[in-house]
Image (cartoon, helix red, strand yellow):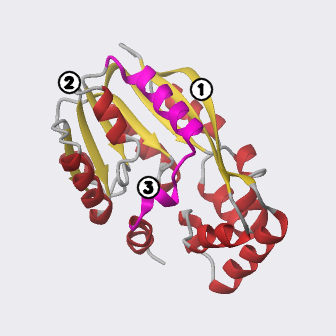
Amino acid sequence: MSKNKIFQALAKNYNQKRALDKTSFQQTIGELAKQLEHAKTVLDLGCGAGRILIPLAHLFPKTEFFAFDISGEMLEGLKKSSLKDNLKNITLIEGDFNQEDWLDRLPKRGFGGIIVLQVIHFFKDQKMAAVNLEKIVLPGGKLIIASTTHEQFKRLPYCLAFPEIMQVELNRTPDINQLLKLYKNLGFQFKGSAHIKAKRDFQNKKEIKRWLMARPFSALSLISDRLFLEGVRHFLAKYSGEVVVDEFTIFTLVKSDHK
């Protein structure tokens, strides 16, 4: 299945499918707000339907936010939310960051902050992506990468229930130590990390099944229906009540004022 079809499928009710629980959502927004409070321009790369961007735009009404995503459906959802909330500080940009000309779609002045939230694994060429991001982060600006580490994948319930998905996630997600080394070589300094664990309290097995059948993770669209249904059965047999549905780490990097 193509990337565009995956994102089109995820676009409907995306905020609900990938919703964080109240505690993890507050932790995520709090960490991002702490890092971005002095940025005048912020790019949310792979913004989706704006579940993170909308609250930040409320918190920082004087900051210019640029919402970049490959999915027109996702951006349409973000547009509706921003209009509903009367937000004037969000600019929508549709594009594919794996295309050579994607930087041309962005304002030339650069960004004081860039958010890459759970999309780093969609970069086809991590080195080229890092080079491009270094070009558009202002000196002293922050690059915030949120990603599930390999160790976290190995204990996530949905990966344990779907062994094929475990392998997909490990194969497509860069090792964080190698990634941090790559950005360090480009002039970024590692400034810290915050660990986020999202949980969901399911009332019964039927509720869990409804959640799984919506394929809330993009990787679940990459396996056959047979393997998917087999994984659903494994998940239902093992998990109930409060379940860890997501886990990731927010890494903050600062671009040096000089190389």
From mark 1 to mark 3, how far is it between C-alphas?
24 Å
- Return the residue nearer the eye: 7 or 246: 246
Q: Earlier in the sequence, mark 1 or mark 3?
A: 3
Q: Specify the label residue 15 is tagged with.
A: 3
Q: Position of residue 148 (x, y in %)?
A: 62, 45
User: Which of disc 3 and disc 2 is earlier in sequence?
Assistant: 3
Left or right of 215: which side holds 136?
A: left
Q: Disc 2 vs disc 1: which is toward the camera?
A: 2
State whether residue 185 appears in this view. no
Amino acid type for the residue under numbered disc 1: Ser
Residue to which mark 1 is pinned: 193
Q: Nearer the viewer, residue 228 or 22?
A: 22
Quadrant position of the C terminus in the picture: top left
Classify residue 176 by image quadrant: top right
- Residue at 23%, 27% in the rendered image: 61
Above or below, 119 against 259 in this view is below
